[in-house]
Structures are given as C-alpha cells and as structure tokens.
C-alpha cells in the first residue's frame, strides 16, 4: 500500500464480513444472496457516507463478477440520452461470466424521464443484467421504478462500532491518538463514516492525531443535520442532536 493512499479507499471493506451493518437481518439477507450467487435488482438508500457504495462493491467482488461485466455510472454526471446509450449497449450483449452488473450511483439525481427509461431497461434486460442502485433520498425515486427493485435502507452504525473501526484504522497506520480527541472526530463526522475517515487522515500529522477545530465541527454538524431533515429522516436527526449534547 502506498503511504499517500486515501484511507477511505485503503480501508474500504472488501468482504461482507468486514462491513458494519446496523441491521443484522440485512446482513443475513446479503449473505444469502452471496451464498446463492444470485442478486435481484437492488436499491440501496441511506445518508451520505453510510456505506452504500462500499456494499455495492462488496457484492460485485463476492459474487465473482468479471470486471468486464461491470458498468459503473454516476447518474449526476449523465444526461438521459447518454445514459440510455451506455446502459442499453452494455446490457444487451452477453456476459463473459454468469451475469452483468450495472452499478448506478446517485440514482435520485435522475430526472423523471430518465427514471421512466430506466424502468423499462430493468424489465427488458433482467435475464442478462442486474442493477445495484444507490441514492441518498429515496423519496425522489418514482414508485414504479422502486417497486422493481429490492429496497434496503441503511442507517448509520452505532457509535461504538464506528469508534472501533476508526481506532483500527489509526492503529494500522501507526497513529498515536487520545481517545477523547478521537471521540470528538467521530461526533463531528457522524453519521458519515467516509467523512470521519477523511477527517482522521487530514488531521494526522507526523503520526499524531491532532486536536479538533471546534468551528469546523459545528459547521459539519449543521450540514449533516440539514441533509437529514431534507430527507425527512427525523430519527437520525434526533440521534445526531443527542450525540452533540451528550
């Protein structure tokens, strides 16, 4: 591993056993898919940084999908016609292995016309291709499209699990840290695990985790709270507020 490699990529889980699930029933369902070697069309929703993209990659890896049979697209970067051409040309050809996979990130960024197009593609090419879609705001997905996928919503892992994961990363990097300082970084980034890992790497200097910047913490907290409220995720918003007051 290169020393200057981003920790978010270096420590991205590669196996289902390394992924932090908030709901153990979800874990069992994904383990079953992997053991059977088959997945339906999937919609993975949840707050930013909750591990949706990581789980998508884990499924591809554990199912043994050949890289040539995987198409990854970020919906926010694509226009409707471009999306149509890319996906259809990919999905209509035979897979080198058992099946093809389209990893569609940020599906909630698709316009209604693009979502309607995607709905027909899911139906027309389901024998040869599966979709693993992720989104932050599930309410932006058309019900007719959502009904054609198995939907899994991801909440943030428990604080204790995140602290253990963060400590494991710091230990692996040989970083010296104060537990109270680490806890403050967890509070500043929670529930965005990716944000927490970025903060840890950003604030590690000469092998020591530096003290936090209070103003940065407050700004991050407000942004996270706004995102949760926009998503109407009142439960997680309350948990975030409570974590700041604890």
Image (spheres, grey):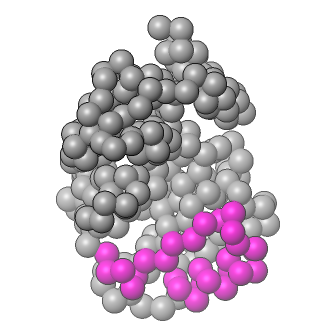
The percent coordinates of residue 127 (x first, y second) are 44, 78
Direction front: furthest residue: 206
> Is residue 4 found left or right of 139 in the rendered image?
left
Residue 111 on the magenta span: no
In percent of the image, x 55 and y 27: which residue is there?
A: 213
Can residue 70 be seen in the rendering of this structure?
A: yes
In percent of the image, x 57 and y 71: which residue is there?
A: 73
In percent of the image, x 26 and y 34: which residue is there?
A: 176
The percent coordinates of residue 197 (x first, y second) are 42, 42
Magenta span of residues: 65-91
**Magenta part, dominant SS:** helix
Direction top: furthest residue: 246
Residue 224 or 127: which is nearer the viewer? 224
> Is residue 244 found left or right of 95 in the rendered image?
right
Please tell me whether residue 221 is drawn above or below residue 108 in the rendered image: above
Please tell me whether residue 168 is drawn above or below residue 112 in the rendered image: above
Residue 89 on the magenta span: yes
The percent coordinates of residue 185 (x first, y second) are 45, 28
Residue 147 or 55: which is nearer the viewer? 55
In percent of the image, x 55 and y 65: which residue is there?
A: 104
Looking at the rendering, which quadrant does residue 182 occupy?
A: top left
The percent coordinates of residue 203 (x first, y second) are 45, 39
Please tell me whether residue 21 is drawn above or below residue 39 in the rendered image: above
> Is residue 53 found left or right of 61 in the rendered image?
right
């Amino acid at each position: 591993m290169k020393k200057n490699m981003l920790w978010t990529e270096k420590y991205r889980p590669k196996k289902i056993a390394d992924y932090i699930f908030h709901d153990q029933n979800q874990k069992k369902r994904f383990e079953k898919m992997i053991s059977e070697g088959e997945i339906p069309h999937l919609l993975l929703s949840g707050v930013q940084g909750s591990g949706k993209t990581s789980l998508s990659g884990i499924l591809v890896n554990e199912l043994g999908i050949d890289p040539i049979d995987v198409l990854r697209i970020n919906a926010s970067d694509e226009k409707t016609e471009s999306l149509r051409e890319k996906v259809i040309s990919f999905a209509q050809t035979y897979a080198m292995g058992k099946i093809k996979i389209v990893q569609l990130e940020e599906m909630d960024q698709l316009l209604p016309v693009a979502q309607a197009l995607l709905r027909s593609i899911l139906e027309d090419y389901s024998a040869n291709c599966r979709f693993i879609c992720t989104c932050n705001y599930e309410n932006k997905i058309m019900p007719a499209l959502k009904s054609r996928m198995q939907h899994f919503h991801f909440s943030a892992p428990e604080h204790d699990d995140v602290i253990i994961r963060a400590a494991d990363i710091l230990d692996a990097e040989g970083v010296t840290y104060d537990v109270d300082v680490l806890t403050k970084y967890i509070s500043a980034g929670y529930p965005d695990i990716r944000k927490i890992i970025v903060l840890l790497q950003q604030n590690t200097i000469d092998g020591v985790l530096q003290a936090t910047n209070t103003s940065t913490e407050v700004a991050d907290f407000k942004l996270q709270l706004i995102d949760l409220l926009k998503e109407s995720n009142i439960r997680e918003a309350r948990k975030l507020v409570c974590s700041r007051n604890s």
